[in-house]
Image: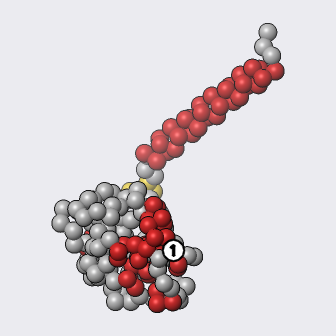
Amino acid sequence: MQTGPIKRLGRVTFGVACATLALTACAKKAESDSSTTTTTTTAATTTPAAAPAAEPAAPKPAAVAADNTDTIAGVKLAAYTGDAKKGETDFITCKTCHAIEAGVNKIGPSLHGVVGRKAGSIPGFTYSTANKNSGITWTEEKLFQYLENPQRVVPGTKMTFAGWPTDPQKRADVIAYLKSNS
């Protein structure tokens, strides 16, 4: 004889199995429906039915100009004094993908000597086309802007980090740390 919790588990399992079967049946019906073509017959000709119009692709956001350092929030790096020691602590977020040591590439390129370096220039690292063709030189101000929202500055970058849009001091601290390790 089944007790309460075991009986409920059996009912849940049965419900999941039924839902799975129903979804599988619907998927097979949808596949068979999409594999047939509808035709319209007129007196002398047969023409395929018109396909629905494709939605236009969303426009790609334009990259920020290589020499533009304006941030979304309108703040400037000059308003902050970076603390390399605090930046080292904040760099923990970056360490998953980047190393600070020269010649050590991970998912992202080494950030040793990044301040003053041209974007996409470390030999042997596979950069996104967007990064290689950005024309950016990583000045402190450009890094400040980039770390606010990387995808805004280089649309199409492989870097998935969302940025620190609400913490300009953290951006200034990380830049100070990067500069101290160049």
Helix, strand or loop at mark 1? helix
- Spot the residue most to the front: 85
Q: Nearer the viewer, residue 159 or 118?
A: 118
**Direction from residue 130 to residue 48 in the image, left or right:** right
Q: Nearer the viewer, residue 18 or 118?
A: 118
Q: Residue at x 53, y 40 (%)?
A: 27
Q: Nearer the viewer, residue 129 or 13?
A: 129
Q: Position of residue 151 (x, y in %)?
A: 43, 72
Could you tell me which quadrant the C terminus lies in? Answer: bottom left
Whether residue 60 is visible to the viewer of this picture, yes or no, is no
- Where on the picture, by quarter, is residue 42? bottom left
- Spot the residue most to the right: 4
* Residue 89 to residue 155: above or below: above
Q: Position of residue 122 (x, y in %)?
A: 21, 68
Identify the residue position indicated by label 1 in the image: 170
Q: Residue at x 78, y 23 (%)?
A: 5
Q: Residue at x 26, y 78 (%)?
A: 117
- Neighbours of disc 1 within 10 Å: few (<14), some (14-19), many (20+): many
Amino acid identity at mark 1? Lys
- Where on the picture, by quarter, is residue 6? top right
Q: Residue at x 25, y 78 (%)?
A: 118
